[in-house]
Amino acid sequence: MKKRYYSFLLAACSMLLTGCGTGNPDVPSLEVPSSYDSSKPIELLVWGSEEDEILLNQIFESFQAAYQDQAAFQITFAAQGESGCKDALMGDLENSADVFTFADDQLHTLAAAGALNPIESAERIKAENLEGAVEAASVGDILYAYPLTADNGYFLYYNQRYLSEQDVETLDQILAVAERQNKKFAMDWSSGWYIYSFFGNTGLEVGLNPDGITNYCTWNQTDGAIRGIDVVEAMSAVAQSPGFYNIDDSGFLAGVQNGSVIAGVSGIWNEMAVKQVWGEHYGAAKLPTYTCREQQIQMSSFSGYKLIGVNAYSKEYQWASKLAEWITNEQNQKLRFELRGQGPSNLSAAKSEEVQKSLGITALLAQSDYSCLQRIGNQYWEPVTKFAQNIAAGNPTRESFQKQLDQMVEKITK
């Protein structure tokens, strides 16, 4: 990890940052422990992504200004990717960060290991954030972390030069327009993250067993309103369209740039690049419906959230909790959107005029009604990729769809 040090001492900050003292009724007072030595600053170590350094620096400054009448601080930033946060913490929990950013799929492990305590202000935090973000930050009904972002998902990008709002309601119509225009609809079928969209809203299920390691999966189910084979036949019909393009995320963006792709499924990280190319014709929406067993099924999605955790072993647990809450408050989630383009989990921030101008964030929020948290064991990914790639290629193996489903499910649940 690469460290950056920011010492925010009371005297300096009180001169540089005015009008932000504890006279502000929105800044809660924190009872200072009797053992607190006012001659020494409160030392806090914060982990975040390297790209967040400038943003967090500003947030540290405003935190110091808000609490300058109560304490002085020395806040140390260290770059640590969210995806690897759990492993870094568990390597030396007692000497790790006081406050850290992590991906929501690590929550259960961290809570079970005693790295996180239940949040004291849980009811207020829950009321201030999106339901999905609260679920992602909770084990059962107990909140263990502070929701930070709500943008790790995917939605539909489309070029309004070719497609209308009505066109993008169904995948059938998107493909029909693409065929007529000799253009493409792009989607990555090499990733189980995206393939879930066809199965996720059908009554067929996949998920993590209580052991936290193995999966359950009913994607090969042979009865019910929607059978596994019905989904595969629908996918096969999509794959056979001349307007379909099975390509990864970088290929989608390349297709946008060279003009061959007029619609595709991707995430918010591509919004600025797509807007640069399509300009005023840039459009975004929730995922479309697709035809399955002679009915329209709304495509689903996996969703993901970034969270802020407080180390249960922090020597300054109260102040670390205050800082975590400050990093994730409405104002700083708006600042995060402004500087980093990341979608807020805070309800008020998500409704702000600035955020609503982002078509991608608006599309993600619309798609959130049809998404679920990614809670999947490692055995899921490889067999889904192999299965979907074969269907995308026109089933060159010539094995029956049911046999392929059975083989895939057997490996997913192994």
Image (cartoon, rainbow, N blue to C red):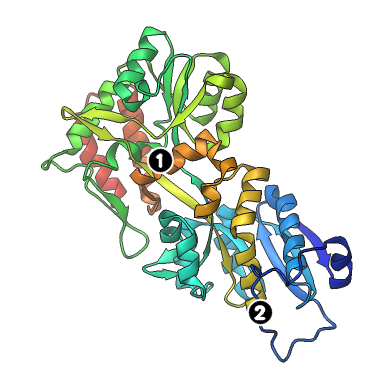
- Residue 157 is situated, as x and y percent measured from the top left of the image, at 47, 28
Q: Mark 2 or mark 1: which comes first in sequence?
A: 2
Horizontal placement of 268 versus 276: left or right?
left
Residue at which label 2 appears: 30
Amino acid at circle 2: Leu
Q: Residue at x 16, y 38 (%)?
A: 227
Closer to us: 162 or 182: 162
> Of residues 244 and 17, which is closer to you in this image?
17
Q: Residue at point 53% right, 53% down?
A: 348
Is residue 251 at all visible to an observer of this figure? yes
In this view, the residue in front, 159 or 305, is: 159
Is residue 199 placed above or below 170 in the rendered structure?
A: below
User: What whole-number distance in Å separates the C-alpha atoms at marks 2 and 1?
Assistant: 38 Å
Q: Quadrant of the N terminus?
A: bottom right
- Viewer-closest of 107 and 164: 164
Residue 183 percent across, percent down from the top left: 43, 12
Residue type, label 1: Ala
Q: Quadrant of residue 62?
A: bottom right
195 relative to 328 in the view: left or right: left
> For this view, does 153 lie left or right of residue 216?
right
Q: Callout 1: helix, strand or loop?
A: helix
Q: Residues within 10 Å of mark 1 (few under 14, many from 20)?
A: some
Return the mark for residue 163. Answer: none
| Residue 242 in view of the camera | no
Name, please, the residue furthest toward the left: 223
Above/below status of 54 relative to 120: above
x, y percentage for residue 350?
52, 48
The image quarter containing residue 265 is top left
CB atoms of marks 2 and 1 within 8 Å: no
Q: On residue 366, which mark appears?
A: 1
